[in-house]
Image (spheres, rainbow, N blue to C red):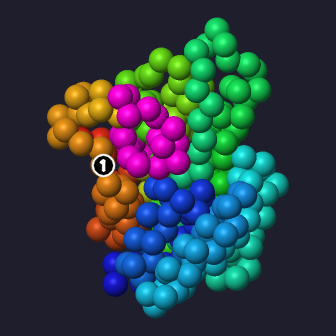
Amino acid sequence: MLLEGKVAVVTGASRGIGRAIAEDLAAHGAVVVVNYNASSEAAEEVVAVITSQGGTALAVQSDVSQFDQAQALIKTTLDRYGQIDILVNNAGTTCDKLLMMMKEQDWDMVLDTNLKSVFNCCKAVARPMVRRKQGGRIINISSVVALVGQAGQANYAASKAGIIGFTKSLAKELGSRQITVNAVTPGFFPTALTAVLPEDAVETSREFIPLGRWGQLPEVAYLVSFLASEKAAYMTGQVISVDGGLAM
């Protein structure tokens, strides 16, 4: 198995891209901690799917936008399994408004959920990974919007672009310890965040995608599992798009 003997923490793993990532990591042999904030039933469903297929998973509630709760998530994992080899920072949200209509709390909420959570979890996991002296994998889920921008998403684009700069900086800090840090920038995928888009917007979006379609959730998960594996040991500080060519 590609990831046998590894322990992974996936934030925002109760649905959408996070769920697909958690299930694929488990399918490749990793023990997976399924982090969620509010969707306990959905998180337990992910755990049930993983265990029904012979894997090992644990649902842990934590609002990773809060520093103390992110620390608690990592501590719970270490107390239970003794190690963390893989961290996937996927927790995210949107609050789309034109800047002239955007309130300060709209900005703060998106930046805290999308960007501060990455700092919080990486801060919590870096020292245990370094002390263990077995390397590690950190994969941060950004967005194609970080690369191209989007009207009405200044807060979301800023948070996801911040993840890219953070990823490159942390990759330089941890590279000597054989801990790789990479970012993935998904394009359009069927998730709760895109479900609110009107059908005409969905159709229009396809016109700008060279492959002419939205992605399927496993297509992100496959890449994350690769980056989490030893096969990607010589890749760090990279920003990899899974977007059907949208951003090129």
For the point 66% across and 47% down, the residue is 117
Identity of the residue furthest to the bottom in this view: 54
Residue 246 found in image quarter: top left
Q: Considering depth in this image, is 228 or 213 the residue closer to the camera?
A: 213
Residue 42 locus on image (x, y percent): 61, 67
Residue that numbered label 1 is attached to: 215
Q: Main secondary structure of the magenta part?
A: loop
For the point 74% across and 54% down, the residue is 63
Left or right of 84 in this view: 50: left
Q: Name the secondary structure under disc 1.
A: loop
Query: Up-down: is 24 above or below 37?
Result: below
Q: Considering depth in this image, is 229 or 14 the residue closer to the camera?
A: 14
Count of numbered badges drawn on the protein: 1
Identity of the residue furthest to the left in this view: 211
Query: Up-down: is 89 above or below 207?
Result: below
Residue 222 locus on image (x, y percent): 32, 63
Q: Amino acid at mark 1?
A: Gly
Is residue 114 part of the magenta span, yes or no? no
Left or right of 50 in this view: 203: left
